[in-house]
Amino acid sequence: MKPALILILFLAGAASGAIEKRFVGSKSCKTDRQYHVQIDSAQHPLGHHCLPLWRTGSSKKLTQTIKLEQQFTYKDEEGRKHDIMLIKLNEDVSAKLPVISLPPSECSKPEEGQQVEVGGWGAKTADVMQSKKPKSLKCGKTDLAACGEADKPDDKYFSDPDTIMCAFKAGVEACSGDGGTAVEYNNVLHGIVVSDPVDKCANPIVIANVCHYRKWIDETIRANS
């Protein structure tokens, strides 16, 4: 069984609406990203979870309903919240759930100009939970680039050049519901999309830098296993 400690992004609730959105500049992930899960919650903050595993390239899914045991939101030394958290579930997830590796503990974020892969559900409406579920995830290639002053997570979360990175490629944009998805570099989880636009798609795409949080991730898992 896989450990019942899952890394997820803490996002503000998506607004409802009928705005047509898709992960722009993407195509079906086919057989990739089988670790990708959708976490549904009838309560906020996260209190009861249904974890549907969508097998990319097929309509099959594995669904578990698991209660939350504990959650750990990252706060820096000054007590500022960052847009990332760990959740601990009160039972193990299915052994059938594929996983993706984290970078080494002493990693550094990839350099500007390096190509990364982003992915998302390609939701058709801003209300992701009410939109028609896609048959497969959508993936796109983009390049890491310098962040501008306006490129940051929601204002309620702290960020600086060490905690985020940005990616830009003409035609590749993050849209409604794409926030919280993995950013792969050399087949390793190096980032999480923190762009979660409602009224328009985002380009550059803003990404939480997983390497900045690796020590905290390891310490939190050890202390709560």
Image: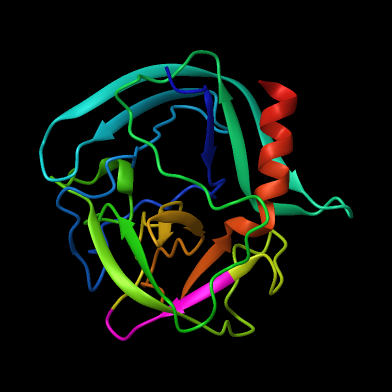
Quadrant location of the C terminus? top right
Q: Residue furthest top?
A: 91
21 or 56: nearer the eye? Answer: 56
Q: Residue at x 23, y 74 (%)?
A: 25
Give the colour scheme shown.
rainbow
Q: Is residue 55 visible?
A: yes
Quadrant location of the N terminus? top left
Q: Residue at x 33, y 49 (%)?
A: 127
Q: Is residue 204 visible?
A: no
* Residue 25 part of the magenta-drawn span: no
Q: Residue at x 33, y 28 (%)?
A: 97
Q: Residue at x 39, y 32 (%)?
A: 40
Q: Is residue 174 above or below residue 87?
A: below
Q: Position of residue 179 (x, y in %)?
A: 44, 56
* Residue 168 part of the magenta-drawn span: yes
Left or right of residue 14, residue 109 in this image = right
Residue span colored magenta: 165-171
Q: Is residue 142 above or below residue 39?
A: below
Q: Is residue 53 above or below residue 162?
A: above
Q: How many marks?
A: 0
Left or right of residue 91, residue 141 in this image = left
97 or 147: nearer the eye? Answer: 97
Q: Position of residue 176 (x, y in %)?
A: 35, 59
Q: Position of residue 168 (x, y in %)?
A: 41, 81
Q: Residue furthest right?
A: 78
Q: To which quarter of the image does residue 183 belong?
A: bottom left
Left or right of residue 201, residue 7 in this image = right
Q: Position of residue 115 (x, y in %)?
A: 38, 75
